[in-house]
Amino acid sequence: SGIYRQDGRQTAAFAVKQLIIELIKHEDKKKPLSDQAIKDRLFAEFKIQIARMTVMNYRDQLKIPASPKRK
């Protein structure tokens, strides 16, 4: 499965999950990124359009807790 970028190219779901892992790994631990913030960063930095719910589902699949539990 894949996610479409703004330019119409497709990115593998696996690659998007890896980007989510990297964003969370480098977040400010005192102010973790919300799913909305991750969604916004994926678009701003990589031009990947993804729904907030998809970010949440991928994060859950990766067994990464929600932002309040990552503080």
Image (spheres, grey):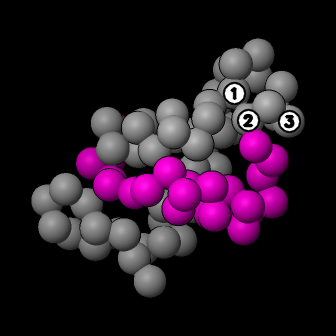
The answer to whether residue 60 shows anywhere in this view is yes
Q: Which residue is mark 3?
A: 69
**Quick one: label 3, few (<14), some, or many (20+) residues within 10 Å?**
few
Q: Amino acid at mark 2?
A: Ser
Q: Amino acid at mark 1?
A: Pro
Q: Are marks 2 and 3 in contact (CB under 8 Å)?
A: yes
Of 52 and 45, which appears nearest the observer? 52
Secondary structure category for the residue under label 1:
loop
Q: Which residue is mark 2?
A: 67
**Quick one: label 2, few (<14), some, or many (20+) residues within 10 Å?**
some
Residue shown at 39%/76% (left/top)? 2
Of 36 and 33, which appears nearest the observer? 36
Q: Which residues are magenta?
A: 45-66
Q: Earlier in the sequence, mark 1 or mark 3?
A: 1
Q: Which residue is mark 1?
A: 32
Residue shown at 31%/36% (left/top)? 44
Secondary structure category for the residue under label 3:
helix
How far apart, in angstroms, are the residues tagged by discs 2 and 3?
5 Å
Q: Are marks 2 and 1 in contact (CB under 8 Å)?
A: yes
